[in-house]
Amino acid sequence: MWFSGFFVVSECFFLTSMAHDWYLAIGKPLLHALIMSQRVSVQLVVGPYGMALLSSMTYMILTFCLPLCGPNIINHFFCDISLLLSLTCANTSLTQLTFFFLAGSTGILSALIMMVSHVCILVAIWKKTAHGRQNAFSTCSSHLVVVSILYGTLFFISVRPGSSPSLDINKVISLLYTVVMPMLNPLVYSLGNKEVRYTFGTKFERKTSPAVLVIRTLLCCTLDVGL
């Protein structure tokens, strides 16, 4: 439970750091190397891990300070905090309020910074040439795909109803940000690179199986229009 909370929170802030970095790369390319110095880069790595560590430790301490009773089985494939709180014998209103504040502040803060960064990116893209706009959109599209999947699933999980019929749907949705998205990250980000797409295209050029034909078609589309 600690690792799941730690990596989800750190992922949110890492995506925020990436959005800010891409704004500097697109909007202020000549100052990018100066602003994004080694010191700033280290801070953008240590910062998300530090905030995720503090947040996860708070979750763990508040959860396991409560007395657990009744059945020790939850209808999930990992230790979800909200389901663990349903097994407690004490009043959990203060704990739930703390969780809501931490999760809400993390989501709102990171989403607000990313929104401002992407608005600034769109303004910077609008001032570029047609070729520059295509390259900039291709660079940002992979980040937007990952952000949409992560925040969409987290928002659904946060506002989900507590009734039991929705638990199976919640488990399927949880698979998106715990399993599917980490598996897609290398593919989504690597296909944004023209050299990688060209290498994949030439590797499967002489293959004729149906699966390879589908992959070749997708690669050709990304080569033509970008992600």
Image (cartoon, rainbow, N blue to C red):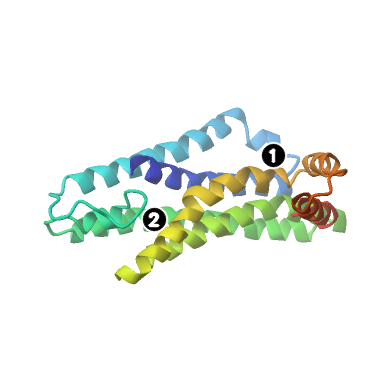
Q: Nearer the viewer, residue 77 or 44?
A: 77
The picture places residue 133, in percent across and down from the top left corner, at 80, 56
The answer to whether the residues at label 2 and label 1 have Cβ atoms under 8 Å apart is no
Q: Is residue 65 visible?
A: yes
The picture places residue 159, in percent across and down from the top left corner, at 38, 67
Q: Residue at x 29, y 52 (%)?
A: 81
Q: CA distance from mark 2 to mark 1?
A: 29 Å
Which quadrant, please, contains the C terminus? bottom right
Q: Residue at x 47, y 54 (%)?
A: 175
Q: Is residue 98 visible?
A: no
Crowding near the residue tagged with mark 1, few <14, some 14–19, many ≥20 C-alpha atoms within 10 Å:
some
Q: Nearer the viewer, residue 26 or 135?
A: 135
Q: Which residue is mark 1?
A: 32
- Amino acid residing under circle 1: His
The picture places residue 162, in percent across and down from the top left corner, at 30, 68
Q: Residue at x 60, y 28 (%)?
A: 38
Tally of numbered discs: 2
Q: Residue at x 34, y 55 (%)?
A: 76
Q: Nearer the viewer, residue 213 or 149?
A: 213
Position of 127 with respect to 182 (left or right) is right
- Amino acid residing under circle 2: Ser
